[in-house]
């Protein structure tokens, strides 16, 4: 049995993907595209238990639902069957999932702490986004309790209009991945964390993702700092499954699922509790619309 689930305290609906491993003659890639290869023929009994220390606080029986927007890939798409729990998570409690195959009696379990909220020192809510080519910008925050791995995406949003009649064509955005591998020294929370990065990445990411179009004009809207935090188990899973950059290509299997494989863990981001949506500074705006990198796009 294979279990994939990531609990997020920002969400009130949580999805868990549960499938089976398969083996057969011929090309496994062809099997992967067939739903029956991965799906169980019957409904499983899936329970999410909430614990405060050793005390059971609540127990939820998960139901099934069909998602219809699965990205293209090796496995079947766009429809996939998943299990769903509707509940608001308590960040002070631990959660345990139990999956029982009622036909065979096979049972798998996994548990996770919930990554807590955290404070962001820089930028603050009253800052303006200031990106200067060749100059460093600094992000500062305190680590989250149960948070190990940190990622920062800076999302630039803009509005697009037709030059011919000024018709609004939509609001669009570009994501700039600043870093994705910073780690806290402990899981206790409150650790001061700092990362400095050059402003060049802001303009280069826009140039790489916004096509030149002489029939439109664009107006800058805002910049959002999105900090994403992964728990210890999810951080380990990412570390192990990342592509190898050595001649040793075989990767070990990492799982925290007992009697099965997969990952059941927690992550969160600041968008739900501590958003950082900023306007561009005058200098950054001038570089965006008149600079050599993006001046022909805005």
Image (tube, grey):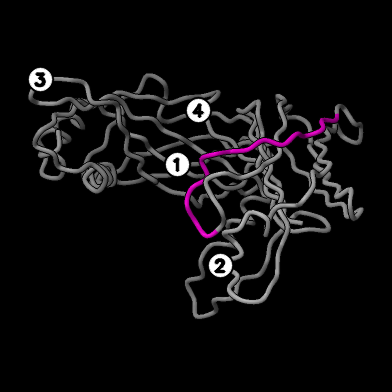
* Residue 136, percent from left and from top: 30, 43
Residue indicated by mark 4? 271
Residue drawn where x is 21% and y is 27% of the image: 160
Looking at marks 3 and 1 on the same chain, the residue that comes earlier in the sequence is marked by 1
* Residue 249, percent from left and from top: 54, 76
Disc 2 crowd rating (10 Å Cα; few below 14, some 14-19, many 20+) is few
For the residues labelled 3 and 4, the Cα–Cα distance comes to: 35 Å
Please tell me the numbered disc located at residue 86: none
Name the mark nearer the viewer: 2 or 4. 2
Residue indicated by mark 2? 29
Magenta residues, start to end: 59-74
Does 160 lie within the magenta span?
no
Q: Is residue 133 above or below residue 260?
A: above
User: Which of the 4 image quarters holds residue 273?
Assistant: top right
Looking at marks 1 and 4 on the same chain, the residue that comes earlier in the sequence is marked by 1
User: Which of the 4 image quarters holds residue 224?
Assistant: top left
């Amino acid at each position: 049995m294979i279990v994939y689930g990531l609990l997020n305290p920002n969400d009130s609906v949580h999805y868990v993907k549960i499938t089976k491993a398969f083996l057969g003659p011929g090309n496994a890639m062809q099997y992967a595209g067939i739903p029956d290869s991965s799906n169980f023929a019957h409904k499983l009994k899936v329970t999410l238990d909430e614990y405060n220390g050793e005390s059971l606080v609540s127990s939820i029986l998960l139901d099934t639902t069909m998602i219809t927007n699965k990205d293209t890939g090796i496995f079947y798409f766009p429809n996939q069957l998943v299990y769903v729990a509707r509940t608001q998570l308590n960040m002070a409690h631990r959660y345990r999932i139990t999956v029982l195959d009622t036909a065979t009696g096979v049972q798998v379990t996994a548990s996770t702490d919930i990554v807590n909220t955290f404070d962001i020192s820089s930028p603050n809510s009253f800052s303006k986004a200031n990106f200067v080519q060749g100059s460093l910008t600094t992000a500062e925050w305190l680590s989250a309790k149960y948070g190990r791995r940190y990622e920062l995406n800076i999302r630039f949003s803009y509005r697009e209009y037709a030059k011919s009649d000024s018709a609004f064509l939509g609001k669009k955005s570009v994501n700039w991945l600043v870093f994705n591998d910073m780690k806290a020294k402990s899981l206790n929370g409150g650790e001061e964390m700092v990362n400095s990065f050059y402003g060049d990445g802001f303009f280069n990411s826009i140039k790489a993702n916004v096509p030149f179009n002489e029939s439109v004009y664009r107006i800058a809207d805002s910049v959002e700092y999105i900090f994403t935090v992964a728990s210890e188990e999810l951080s380990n899973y990412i570390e192990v499954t990342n592509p190898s950059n050595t001649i040793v290509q075989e990767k070990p299997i990492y799982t925290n699922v007992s009697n099965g494989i997969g990952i059941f863990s927690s992550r969160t981001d600041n968008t739900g509790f501590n958003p950082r949506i900023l306007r561009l500074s005058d200098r950054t705006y001038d570089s965006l619309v008149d600079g050599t990198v993006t001046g022909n796009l805005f």
